[in-house]
Image: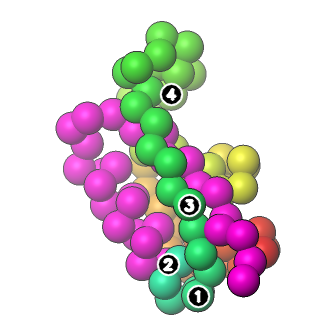
Amino acid sequence: MTDPVPISVYRRHPCELCEEAVETIESAAEEAAVPVAIETVDVDSDPALRDRYGDRVPVVAVDGRERFELFVDKIGLIGALRDAR
């Protein structure tokens, strides 16, 4: 079995787009048959993160690389997950 692909979701609470991003990630991972480890990071918990991301959340990093901002493209994410394997 392969190690899960690390995914970081930079978000704030409450955030409907952030919830949708996590749902899309879970759906894409299942469709691609690629295990993922999702970490959510509240940007408001750290002034540096709040300054860095501002209002442009969610930001999704796949395997350490920021790939999506505001919306997650499911097809693009499936490709990124397969590339990260």
- Relative placement, left or right, of 20 versus 83 is left
Reply above or below: 17 against 85.
above
Circle 3: residue type:
Ala
Circle 4: residue type:
Tyr
Pinpoint residue 40: horizontal percent, then vertical percent.
45, 44
Q: Count the marks: how many?
A: 4
Does the image show residue 84?
Answer: yes
Foreground mark, 4 or 2, reads 2
Is residue 26 magenta-colored? yes
Q: Name the residue under label 1.
A: 33
Q: Provide the secondary structure element on which disc 1 rests.
A: loop
**Crowdedness near tag 1: few (<14), some (14–19) or many (≥20) residues, C-alpha within 10 Å:** few
Query: Which tag, 4 or 2, sits closer to the chain's start?
Result: 2
The residue at the far front in this view is: 1
Circle 1: residue type:
Ala
Q: Which dot marks residue 53?
A: 4
Asked whether 67 or 32 is in front, the reply is 32
Please state the extent of the stretch shown in magenta in the rendering: 1-28
**Crowdedness near tag 4: few (<14), some (14–19) or many (≥20) residues, C-alpha within 10 Å:** some
Query: Which tag, 4 or 3, sits closer to the chain's start?
Result: 3
The Cα atoms of the two marked residues, 3 and 2, are separated by: 13 Å
Asked whether 3 or 84 is in front, the reply is 3
